[in-house]
Image (cartoon, rainbow, N blue to C red):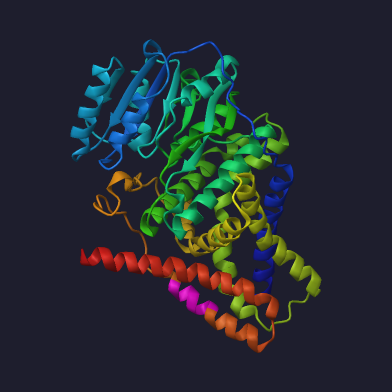
Amino acid sequence: MLQTYLSVLALLCLYGLHRVWMVARFRWRRRDDGARADARPFVTVQLPVYNERTVVARLIRSIGALDYPRERLEVQVLDDSTDETREIVDREVAELVARGIDAHVVRRADRRGFKAGALDHGLARAKGELVCIFDADFTPASDFLLALVGHFGDPKVGMVQARWGHENRESSTLTRAQSTLLDGHFVIEHKVRHDSGLFFNFNGTAGVWRKRAIVDAGGWQHDTLTEDLDLSYRAQLAGWRFVYAPHVVAPAEVPPDIAAFKSQQRRWAKGSVQVAKKLVGSILTSKQPLRVKLEALAHLTGNTGYPLVVLLALLLPAMVGMQLGLPEPVHVALFATSTLSVFLFYETGQRALGRGAAKRAFDVVAAVALGIGMSLSQTRAVLSGLFGGTGEFVRTPKVGDARGALRAYRSVRAGIPGLELLFAAWFVFGIVRACEHERWLALPFFTLFFAGFAWVGVLSVTQWMRESRA
């Protein structure tokens, strides 16, 4: 058990050092990253939707408000819906057409390939040399396209990604924590990878592709659940350059409840493992520099940290009072690098966005606790990605304009609701043991693990009970 504990801690320490490296490389210049130009290439805006009746009208209207020449713009609503979303889409698209916008509803006979299949189906009919993609809960500003298309003046640029905003960040502690986690990805990871000439990914929405780059990379494929990550790496391996525009922000909705959040995160975690299985060989044998290969591996295998967190959670209370066989300063350094680096990472992202000290402190602690609490669900997703089939693309339920009035869609659940509460109870035992052995430095960490598992467990059970009665 001791060797397992030290091995887990050492591996988590490597992830911690990677975060410290990113923070050290991070620079946040407050300027407009949009490379505006006189050229107005033809753009096809693709809106893949599936049963999105609470948000689809808002999405289509925001696309209709884009400030871009009408003669250079096409809108495709790729509608795989099976409910009243279809009628809403038809009505809203008809209004765009009446205003002189080249807008179409594109429907398929079946949902084969899920989102990737819909995008591929639409791409074959797209008129634009550039393709802009938005998920159903996004509401881009009117100047979104003007801020990004100038980057394509460089013929080597294959994709430009904007940053996600979080329109419901302040709705609850859960949405604040989620927003902080996403900011770590969009503010620090994307920025550092882009500035350092490393691979980074299109996030499935709020980005613009050169159509030729998609085709050149092999097109949209649906053998993983993260078709965006898959295509991103294939395109960059094919020689296309990606651009990140962090000061162009597209507002969206983070999942409002724990079941929806778990569903979203399971798909992302499982899909990233599937992409790693699919492309690691190609990455390692490519002609890319070693630093690019190493960062790509760190990126694609990042979710394997969740099983390590679960192992650490199982071991920590049991290790109280045991002799570790290494100097105490070394143990403290390993543990601090594994844990405090996470706080530093997310705090840096929130500080860059200008959030006040009190908000930063609360949000970062909540984000770290949420990450811990999610480790059980995410571990299941990682194992499924390693050993299971492709699986079904499960949409993330949106609330949109139906807040408090219409619970239109329920999340698809996996696993036992509230299993995290067993881990919370295990850490109550750990806290008691730490007090008995006067391991006072361990108490804040044990309390954080307890809070994370208890919070996610209570939210999961509460929502399950509420929806079971409905």
**Residue at 37% of width from left, 54% of height from top?**
260
Asked if the stretch drawn in magenta spans residue 426, the answer is yes
Left-right relation of 193 to 60: right
Residue farthest toward the bottom in the current orientation of the protein = 436
Residue 294 in view, yes or no = yes
Residue 416 in view, yes or no = no
Q: Quadrant of the C terminus?
A: bottom left
Percent x, y of residue 235: 54, 27
Asked if the stretch drawn in magenta spans residue 452, the answer is no
From this view, report whether residue 219 is shown above or below residue 275: above
Percent x, y of residue 325: 77, 76
Left-right relation of 408 to 242: left
Front residue of this view, candidates 456 and 211: 456
Percent x, y of residue 465: 28, 68
Left-right relation of 291 to 209: right
**Residue at 41% of width from left, 15% of height from top?**
128
Q: Quadrant of the N terminus?
A: bottom right
**Residue at 57% of width from left, 74% of height from top?**
447
From this view, report whether residue 251 is shown above or below residue 9: above
Q: Which residues are magenta?
A: 421-427
Percent x, y of residue 318: 60, 80
**Residue at 49% of width from left, 37% of height from top?**
203
The mark total stands at 0
Front residue of this view, candidates 135 and 430: 135
Front residue of this view, candidates 324 and 103: 103
Residue 116 in which image quadrant:
top left
* Helix, strand or loop for the magenta stretch, by majority: helix
Left-right relation of 91 to 136: left
Residue 242 in which image quadrant:
top right
